[in-house]
Image (cartoon, rainbow, N blue to C red):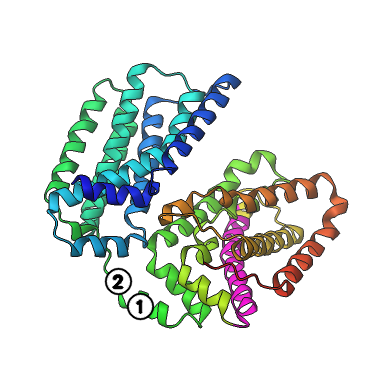
Amino acid sequence: MKMTGKAFAKKLFGARYERLPRTLLIDVIVFWGLYIAGFQVQIAPSVRILMISAFTAGVMWQALSSGDNITELRHMLMLPHRNREFVFSYVVALGAYAVLTKTGLLFAVVLAVSVWKPIEIVRMLICMIHAVLMAAAVYSLRKYWYAGGIWTAAIVAVILFLGSRAWFSLLLFVNGMFAALILWRADGYAFYQWESKKKRTIRQKKAALWRYFFRYLSCHKNYLLNTAVMWCVALVLPYFLRGMAGMSVIPVGFAILSLNTPICIMLSCDRDLEQAVRFLPGQKRRFCIPYCLFIFLCNMTADVIFLLSWQIQNGGVTVLMIFGAVFFALQSAELSVLLEWFYPIRDWKIESDLWHHPRKYVVPVVMLLLAGAASAWPVLLPVLPCVLVLETVVLLFTPAKQRAK
């Protein structure tokens, strides 16, 4: 068990675990910076527990469903192993990755901005361990997805209604033991993602880029789920922005809806595709133009839903707002493709690192700055289309750099 866990840990944290101290140092800096700022927020215990649990379980699920783990698991499962030791080594390694590198930052922020007692730290640590065990147990039973869905919904309801009770930690402990019992009876193949014919077909037909994009999404259900979540955000966003009605707040909604990470990392997350695109002649335009149009289509869909919801709830959608939707959707698409082409993400271990990379905020922040500039200085509106033209020239006519490793 020790050797198996060390093999997985070295993959996630580096050969000498060099990633771990760097991440913990960032957490300490964030905590101390927010703590000395004196900024305080009242957070109900049930909300705090749900926040920590949902985030940890989400990161754990992303780590378990990462396509990069298929090869690792295949090689490990080919070696002689004991099922229980293998399963718990794998879950512990991924759980430590989720808690220490991802949830740790949220934990530091929550501790810095809220009032807490020492016992509450213990409760939140129990929540993290419980979320890791439950996510792994539900993932091992994904063949019975309906049972996992009911179990998850029941736990969420219990957290919301009973999260403030003193004995709630005992309930999480019991449920965590039940999840551990399910893992005790599972085997390593319960975490292995069998490669479907669709995925093999994708590798064989990468020349058909549009077909590749849509089939890639169809083979990664969590990518589709993230896109569906963005559409739901587009539906409810006008309700929260209605107090600031006017053209000046509409671009803020467009900027928020550009935060669709999965569709903006397709080159970074598929190393084989990147290598083929960069080394085959004439592939820059053939890839970048369809990829830009694909992101534009996804962004425009969210923006259209946002405008329709705004019209239903607030009314007053104008032609200028529609023009703004087209501009921001195309602008964010071109910026995303430029980042993917010139600055791809390479130092990632599993796909969850791509989802949470700080680069995901670059495009939304630029969109917010453009929205603020256009609102403060309307004279800049005629200049904005020129920015698109300049980016298109850079994208299409800048010599390609052979950066693939």
Q: Main secondary structure of the magenta part?
A: helix
Circle on res. 195: 2
Asked if 256 appears above or below 223 in the picture, the reply is above
Residue 253 shows in this picture: no
Q: Residue at x 70, y 46 (%)?
A: 249
Check whether the beta carbons of the residues at disc 2 and disc 1 lie within 8 A of each other. Answer: yes
| Residue sticking out furthest to the front | 16
For label 2, count other residues whose C-alpha is less than 10 Å away and answer few (under 14), some (14-19) or many (20+): few
Q: Position of residue 347 (x, y in %)?
A: 49, 54
Q: Position of residue 13 (x, y in %)?
A: 39, 46
First reached walking from the N terminus: tag 2 or tag 1? 2
Residue 306 located within the stretch drawn in magenta: yes
Q: Residue at x 82, y 64 (%)?
A: 386
> Looking at the image, which is closer to me, 1 or 169?
1
Q: Which residues are magenta?
A: 281-309
Residue 33 shows in this picture: yes
In the picture provided, is 130 more to the left or to the right than 398?
Answer: left
Circle on res. 200: 1
> Looking at the image, which is closer to me, 374 or 31?
31
Q: Secondary structure at mark 1?
A: helix
